[in-house]
Amino acid sequence: MNLDGKTAIVTGAASGFGAGIARSFAAEGAKVMVVDLDIDAAQAVATDIAGIAHRADVSNGDQVSDMIETAIARMDHVDILVNNAGVTHLPAPMEEITEDDFDRVFAVNCKSVYLTARALVPHLKHRQTGAILNIASTAGVSPRPNLNWYNASKGWMNTATRTMAVELAPSGIRVNALNPVAGETPLLKSFMGEDTPEMRSKFLSTIPLGRFSTPQDLGSAAAFLCSDAAGMITGVCMEVDGGRCI
């Protein structure tokens, strides 16, 4: 029960990595706000873990502010924020990605981190404690061709994590990131372009441990980094990738 008594917000938590993180946090004793655009799926996860479901578009400043205000009102305070919500564009040469797709990727993957920080950091500074975890990707460490702007957004997230960690450390706030390899989540098909045995085999051949990451893998790593057991760890962008980035 490493998170016993802690409160957490996990965005994009209705499925995939976010749901895995929310479930791991609850298993470790945390009270979790499950945030997603799909409120029905969020409510299903929240019901399973005795948490709170909340609908929010994390690229919208007003909705993010409401999310934070609601979390504080419902849980009294916030100890942990996980910026997990993310989107990608379909694989294509960089010059063929539409401006709308580019804007969507950076709004959800990057602007959301700014918006959640703007809304939550004053609360964390007042309490002089807290943990922020950004879910980036191996795409931001060792990019694959034809996912250029998604790669760039996740590289941005890793840099943002480090600079947030440096600035917020004097206030007792730790900031880390996880870089998962492609996993068994709703985004997998988008990364591959098509979900076929041949494409899966191609992707798996680049992962030394020979399997995709799972929501449970991310949940376990996230629970550790957000616990007091990781109290001296900040600014770390940790690969959860089966050796993909070696």
Image (cartoon, rainbow, N blue to C red):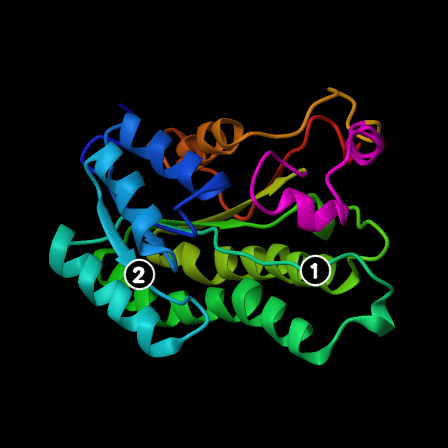
Instruction: Tell me the residue that label 2 is attached to.
Output: 55
Instruction: Identify the residue shown where x is 49% and y is 40%.
Output: 16
- 203 left or right of 171 in image: right
Label 1, secondary structure: give it: helix
240 falls in the magenta region: no
- 135 left or right of 194 in image: left
Q: Nearer the viewer, residue 238 or 86?
A: 86
The answer to whether residue 76 of the structure is visible from this angle is no
Q: Quadrant of residue 45?
A: top left
Q: How many residues crowd mark 1 within 10 Å: few (<14), some (14–19), many (20+)?
A: many
Where does the C terminus fall, quadrant-wise? top right
Where does the N terminus fall, quadrant-wise? top left
The answer to whether residue 68 of the structure is visible from this angle is yes
Total labels drawn: 2
**Disc 2 residue type (three-letter):** Arg
Q: Quadrant of residue 29?
A: top left
Q: How many residues crowd mark 2 within 10 Å: few (<14), some (14–19), many (20+)?
A: many
- 4 left or right of 110 in image: left
Q: Nearer the viewer, mark 1 or mark 2?
A: 2
Residue 165 percent location from the top left of the image: 49, 55
| In the image, residue 155 above or below residue 216 | below
196 falls in the magenta region: yes
Q: Nearer the viewer, residue 50 or 141?
A: 50
Choose the circle earlier in sequence order: 1 or 2: 2
Q: Which residues are magenta?
A: 182-204
Instruction: Tell me the residue that label 1 is attached to.
Output: 150
| In the image, residue 136 above or below residue 231 | below
Instruction: Identify the residue shown where x is 39% and y is 46%.
Output: 14
| In the image, residue 51 above or below residue 83 | above
Residue 227 percent location from the top left of the image: 35, 34
Q: CB atoms at circles 1 and 2 under 8 Å apart?
A: no
